Amino acid sequence: MRTIAGGTEAGDAGRASDASIRFLQGVATDSLGNVYISDADDHRVRRVDRSGLITTLAGDGLPGFSGDAGPGSRSRVNTPYGLTVTPTGDLIFADLGNARIRRISRNGQIETIVGGGTREIPAAGQFIPPKEVRLIAPRNVLASPSGSLFISDFGANRVLELRSDGSLTSLPLTAVELNSPAGLALDAEGNILVADSGNARVRRIRRDGRVDILAAASKEMPLERPVGLARRSDGSLLIADTRGDFLWQLDVQGKSTILPPGGRDVAVDPFGSIVSPCCQAQPARRCSRRFKRQPLLLRYRESPCSLCTSGWLDLNSRGIGRSGLSWRWWACHPGLSKHSYLPCRRLLRQCLRL
């Protein structure tokens, strides 16, 4: 596991690991392995390339709305949240504070593609031009291989579809009411998976409107506020739970595993690495008794801890403990139950140089 973004300097055109990031809310990756992040409090959308350099694509650090039909680098956004990359390489993000969905094309131009109008959100089976709708709180977006774009509206409790023909509609739901829908993903059959955050569930919406539950709070996986989803190549589902900053993996057999933290969103890059925002601590570049809380962007693979023989590396935000650290690194001992942890003291002595 390594930090790829988050530090104490503004950082544009420099190393992402040194960049100042205030409040990460969304993450996405493209086919080349570039990582895109939304910094909601700093009102910026940024890219971290494979060499580790960070660039602002939209926003100037102040909330506002401007720049459509011009370069994204000169635009203003307001509290950006979820992001997605289309099959053609365009970046689409939820400009939540402006109640719009905006697109940054490959040449850097920004435009509104959904929202900004006065019409109510259409019901399932009704189709309207996307710029005529008045969104309430668009939170997450998902571009499908077929050309459709799916949008979760946190305030309207709906999931919308911008179809490839340019029309906007709502997905049909049978006998189910969503509560603050957030993260979106596709399963192998093309059904929509949605993090029903207010109901502490992950649901599957089939194309005919039937809805079933894929994950719910249990003793093995105590979901509280699932907000981010991503699927891995083996079919397992990653679930980011913002309460406690937990990241869960649910395999195809239904077995759950807790992973290093990242409770705001999650993505999988084309090389199989998991990318997730984490708000636990600042990068461990210096040896110190205490570490300030600072948003991080972590990229990691599942691998044994290189500095400790206790087993798999994990990071747990629960409890401060006798060490006096504001957070702690842990190693999960193979002989313990999966929710039991031992402090990795050797890792602490090495100043967390991973």
Image (cartoon, rainbow, N blue to C red):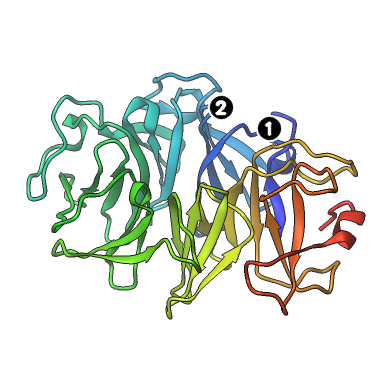
Q: Which residue is mark 2?
A: 42
- Residue 224 percent location from the top left of the image: 45, 52
Q: Label 2 crowding class (10 Å Cα cut-off): few <14, some 14-19, many 20+?
A: many
At 32% across and 31% down in the image, what residue appears?
Answer: 100
Q: Are marks 1 and 2 in contact (CB under 8 Å)?
A: yes
- In the rendered view, would you say 11 is above or below 279? above
Farthest-out residue, left: 126
Amino acid on which the number 2 mark rests in the picture: Asp
- In the rendered view, would you say 168 is above or below 260? above
Side of 262 relative to 284 (left or right): left
Distance from the alpha carbon under mark 1 to that under mark 2: 9 Å
| SS at badge 2 | loop
- In the rendered view, would you say 221 is above or below 158? below
Can residue 174 be seen here?
A: yes
- Residue 112 percent location from the top left of the image: 31, 32
Q: Which residue is mark 1?
A: 20
At 72% across and 78% down in the image, what residue appears?
Answer: 334
At 37% across and 59% down in the image, what residue appears?
Answer: 185
- In the rendered view, would you say 346 is above or below 5? below
- Residue 61 percent location from the top left of the image: 56, 22
Quarter where residue 76 is shown: top left
Query: Which numbered marker is on residue 211?
Result: none
Side of 349 relative to 49 (left or right): right
Counting residues from the start of the chain, the first of labels 1 and 2 encountered is 1
Quadrant into which the C terminus falls: bottom right
Q: Nearer the viewer, residue 324 or 102?
A: 324
Q: Nearer the viewer, residue 148 or 314?
A: 314
Q: Nearer the viewer, residue 128 or 139?
A: 139
- Residue 242 percent location from the top left of the image: 51, 47
